[in-house]
Amino acid sequence: MTHTANGPSHDPSDPTRPTDSSDTRSPDLPEMPAPRVTEFPAHSIPGGLALLLGLLGVVAAVALVVLGASIAAAGGKFALIGIGILLFLGSLLAMSGLNMVAPGEARVVQLFGRYRGTIRTDGLRWVNPLTTRNKISTRVRNHETAVLKVNDAYGNPIELAAVVVWRVEDTAQALFEVDDFLEFVSTQTEAAVRHIAIEYPYDAHEEAGLSLRGNAEEITEKLAVELHARVEAAGVHIVESRFTHLAYAPEIASAMLQRQQAGAVVAARKLIVEGAVGMVEQALARITEQDIVELDEERKAAMVSNLLVVLCGDRATQPVINTGSLYQ
């Protein structure tokens, strides 16, 4: 994002520029009202010149008062003192229009309730002293939700929390479109996290299905899209969002742990059996190829059974030595 002297301007070719709501809108995303006011630069001048003129006005006012006090004529005395007092008050009023803007801050200018623009240029700036200037931070901020307890798509109670990195992009929308943009971001973040949690299971029973634990990157992208749709009305841009805590609720954690362990055991056994079958197949092929011994189908079946028991068993086997013939 690039900035002009007093406000932001967006490059359409910038890949980091947030997409318009029409680009990412889906039926599941909330419909926010269109903004009634958007940010534009406020008219301001460098504050150094205004400060110099104000100080010169104060010095001139003091000089007029002193000069008027030294004049004997009553008419000239009151005139000079009156002009000096008015000039002094006018200079103080003019200098009240000075604003110190730090980097990462902005001033939202209002004149009699009407929005008159935003000052983003850092340093000393001067605007109409009759206006009110509200300071608003445009720095990057973090918001971490509390640990939320919700039911996933399968109805299992889970606990999750997320952290959102965001910043104010449109100061006018942040100040005028919502009552309190900080509370708005907090509430909408929690709502988005809850909505994502109930849309997907913690663990998918189907291999092709999305799950909160197994597809963290895809779910995070969906969370970012939904967050952008929810907070764009407040002029807020979501930089990044991540889940910081994801677990089953304590009341079912032990049962789900047993289920996960059982699934791991089944997967391990499947891998062991596949490897054992390959080894048995290779052994039979080598025996036949090198004509080590001639086995009939019954003895092949017995050999396969014995090898599978040895290879797939979880304990050490106890060999039995046959001292007789092959068929006894």
Image: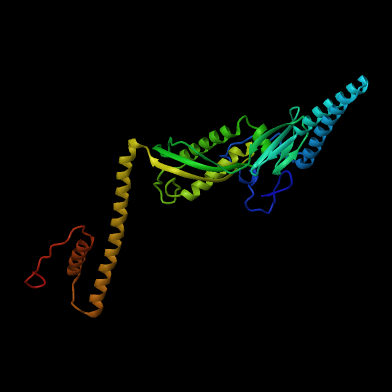
Report the front residue among 57 and 157: 57
Task: Indicate whether 210 appears above or below 116.
Answer: below
* Residue 267 locus on image (x, y percent): 32, 54
Q: How is the image coloured?
A: rainbow
Residue 270 located left or right of residue 180: left
Q: Nearer the viewer, residue 264 or 166?
A: 166
Query: Which residue in the rendered view is the most extreme toward the top?
Result: 74
Q: How many marks?
A: 0
Q: Is residue 201 visible?
A: no
Above or below residue 327? Residue 118 is above
Q: Would residue 102 be found to the left or right of residue 78 on screen?
A: left
Q: Residue 274 at what x, y percent from top left? A: 30, 62
Query: On the picture, is 90 further left or further right than 202?
Result: right
Foreground pick, 1 / 207: 1
Looking at the picture, does residue 102 appear above or below residue 178?
A: below
Residue 126 point in image, percent of width and height: 76, 38
Which residue is pictured at 33% across the width and 35% down the height? 251
> Residue 118 location, x and y as percent?
72, 38
Residue 156 or residue 77, whichever sits in front: 77
The vertical placement of 179 against 253, above or below, is above
- Write the residue at 84% across / 29% down: 87
Q: Quadrant of residue 149?
A: top left
Name the residue: 46% across, 42% down: 200
State the residue lying farthest toward the left.
324
Please indicate, yes or no, whether residue 151 appears anywhere in the rendered image: yes
